[in-house]
Amino acid sequence: MSFKVPRGTQDILPGESAKWQRVEEIIRDLCRVYRYDEIRTPMFESTELFTRSVGETTDVVQKEMYTFEDRGGRSLTLRPEGTAAVVRSYVEHKMFGSPDQPVKLSYVGPMFRYERQQAGRYRQFVQFGVEAIGSDDPAIDAEVISLAMDVYEQAGLTDIKLVINSLGDKETRDNHRAALVAHFEPAIGEFCSDCQSRLAKNPLRILDCKKDHAHPLMATAPKLTDYLTESAAAYFADVKMYLDTLGIAYEVDPNLVRGLDYYNHTAFEIMSTASGFGAITTLCGGGRYNGLTKEIGGPDAAGIGFAMSIERLLLALEAEGKSLDLHNALDVYIVAMDEAAKVKAVELASTFRTKGIAAEIDYAQRKMKAQMKAADRLQAKFVLILGETELQQQVAAVKEMATGEQQAVAFSDLVTYLQDKLGGQA
Ligand code: HAM
């Protein structure tokens, strides 16, 4: 019997995990400077939370949720996304009562969607997301977008573009909805059964259909932007003005509708334009969801956020042929030539580690040459060589790998010597 990871999931192996840690470090640093505090919510929530917020007619709710009944007969769902839970928590913990509005929150964690496996699409994936709840200032829309763009920039991506749209307010959407029904109704028989049921429930979702996207009526469908009310149009203009102020380039795409129901006003996606990238080019998606707090039982509050998967960020880097600056090289590898030297190596490694110097020694009884090779593979910055002579003289032969320079350093001076040299390299 042999086992494999479940379809649509992956093991992040050593080497690969260093990339994840680097991305998470970029994210943590940016969330600190933008002041988005971390929130951790459970991996599962009541199913009803997602049907109400993400929306009953969406693919996520209809086809992709991992829903199960627990032993107490409750219907629970592994979270397919993070916004619903964060908004639930905002309401449950009465964060709306804090004088510091908007409340700015961030999260990194696994999400689960039963999707068809393909490049960039997993059944368990890790989203980094932020939510700013409690403000309808267009400047915060621009801040949220700017944070997402900064993550990609700091990771080293250059082939990306920001696409934005406005989904307007309730009046905008009601008028647009009526126009969509009038547009699709006469030919709805030519569409898939999902679209047929969407016509009455949520015709906007038709534009998002993966099966019927090539139908000629799709291209000629009434555009939401043509139905924007004056105040919604003014809001959108302000968001664009702030993006211009921040020097963030964007394209307006009137066909951008998002796959989840809670959105209104600003909607945006960041895509990879790298030629090697697969069919799914969206790296990040987000938008405004004013009123979602009310929908799930709280007071009416405005909110905006985004989420991006770390998987797609790493795929985009690969497509651009870029690698992250991992700063994970080993500081020092200690080569021991005999048993007595091995004991000293164990002692020195321990001393180095307590001083924050990354140190490794040989545990496989390898000969000196093989130990030197191991040091190379680990990209050690320094190699310390300990033999009989060195022990007698209480010194180590220290080789700086970048320059090939070698010098004898007294045991008592090793920590300061390495700290000086490593500090200079940082
Ligand atoms: P979403 O567009 O469903 O939005 O997902 C956001 C991002 O999650 C996608 O752009 C992609 O990077 C990643 N993603 C989604 N599904 C998969 C998958 N199967 N495999 C790999 N990556 C995936 C949301 O989830 C909203 N909660 C975003 C948001 C936050 N809006 C406002 N606040």
Image (cartoon, helix red, strand yellow):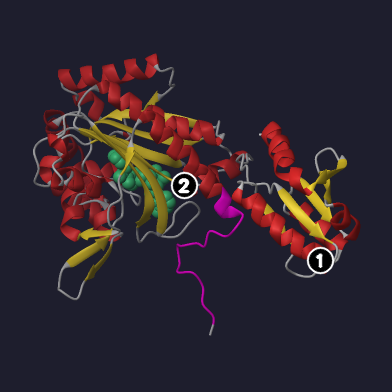
Percent position (x, y) of residue 266? 27, 29
**Label of residue 340 in the image:** 1
Between 7 and 135, the residue placed more toward the observer is 135
The residue under the point 13% across, 32% down is 170
Is most of the magenta stretch helix, strand or loop?
loop
Tell me where residue 46 appears, x and y as whole percent.
Answer: 18, 60
Q: Residues within 10 Å of mark 2 (few under 14, many from 20)?
A: many
Which numbered disc flags the more N-terminal residue, 1 or 2? 2
In the foreground, 235 or 184: 235
In the rendered structure, which amino acid carries the disc numbered 2? Ile
Question: Taking 175 as reference, is 6 above or below it?
Answer: below
Residue depicted at x 43% and y 39%: 28
- What residue do we see at 44% from left, 41% from top? 283
Quadrant in which residue 291 is drawn: top left
Q: Is 101 positioned to the left or the right of 395 in the image?
A: left
Q: Nearer the viewer, residue 45 or 326?
A: 326
Residue at horizontal 34%, vertical 26%? 143
Residue 32 coordinates in the image, percent (x, y): 39, 33
Name the residue beneath numbered marker 2: 310
Say what secondary structure mark 1 lies in.
Answer: helix
Pinpoint residue 148: horizontal percent, then vertical percent.
Answer: 41, 33
Residue type at numbered disc 1: Ala
Seen in the picture, residue 290 relative to 75 is either above or below; the reply is above
- Look at the image and give the residue range highlighted in magenta: 2-18
Can residue 37 be seen here? yes
Q: Is residue 214 visible?
A: no
Q: Within the magenta stretch, is there residue 9?
A: yes
